Amino acid sequence: MYKNKKCFTLTIGCILTFVITGCTSFEHYKNPDAAAEETECKYDSFNDNVTCTMPEIGTCSDGREANFSFGKCPFPSSHVYLRVAYNNSSKMALYVINGYVRSNGWNYPYKVLDNSGKNFSFDKQTSKVDYCYSGNCVTKEYFSISIDRGYIRRHIRDGINMKIYGKEGGSLIKIPAAYVQGFEKVLRSEGL
């Protein structure tokens, strides 16, 4: 029912032709319906599961939206998406914030707190070098934060704001209210 972001291609012609391709995925920051429409739900009939994943959003270390197509973002930055995995047989649901910290070198994230000071289960997963330039390497350190449905509902109006603490500095997570509202809309429509 819900689909991923829509992409566009713009061709600019002169003597040479340049083709710019980008994705118009930033509406989900402001519009709950757009956030819901960009959500992808996958059904696994063999295991009787449904998994719904929101589009990725990012936050720069200075609090701005991380949009690498249109400007620089100070490191470290966080890139996250909300996800639910639901098993119809057991009626069990797992709600998580999945993502990664992107930084100039290893940040070693170790804990996460929301803006009220609540500590969350923070599962470090894998790490990789994204790319290197002039002797520096940009890294991605992947994580998962467990949340519950009540937490999602409590943040419908204000969004979710968290900080990931790392050895080399903090990284902000800002999930706008419209994005949370879109996720809740998908959960309701899927009967989760």
Image: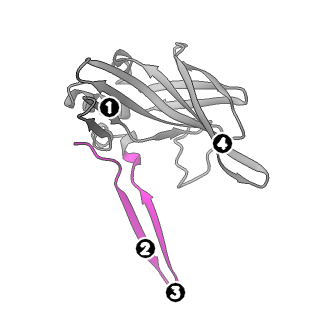
Q: Quadrant of the N terminus?
A: top left
Residue type, mark 1 in image: Phe
Q: Quadrant of the C terminus?
A: top left
Q: N-terminal of the two: label 1 or label 4?
A: 4
Q: Position of residue 33 (x, y in %)?
A: 27, 40
Of badges 1 and 3, nearer the viewer stands: 1
- The answer to whether residue 151 of the structure is visible from this angle is yes
Residue drawn at x 69%, y 32% is 107
Q: CA distance from mark 2 to mark 3?
A: 12 Å
Q: Secondary structure at mark 2?
A: strand
Tell me if 183 is positioned left or right of 76 in this view.
left
Asked if the residue at tag 3 contacts the one at tag 2, i.e. Cβ–Cβ closer than 8 Å, the answer is: no
Residue drawn at x 58%, y 39% is 60
- The answer to whether residue 114 of the structure is visible from this angle is no
Asked if the residue at tag 2 contacts the one at tag 4, i.e. Cβ–Cβ closer than 8 Å, the answer is: no
Disc 3 target residue: 15
Q: Secondary structure at mark 4?
A: strand
Of badges 4 and 2, nearer the viewer stands: 4
The part of the chain drawn in magenta is 1-27
Q: Is residue 21 magenta?
A: yes
Q: Secondary structure at mark 3?
A: loop
Residue drawn at x 20%, y 26% is 191
Asked if the residue at tag 2 contacts the one at tag 1, i.e. Cβ–Cβ closer than 8 Å, the answer is: no
Disc 2 target residue: 11
Disc 4 target residue: 139
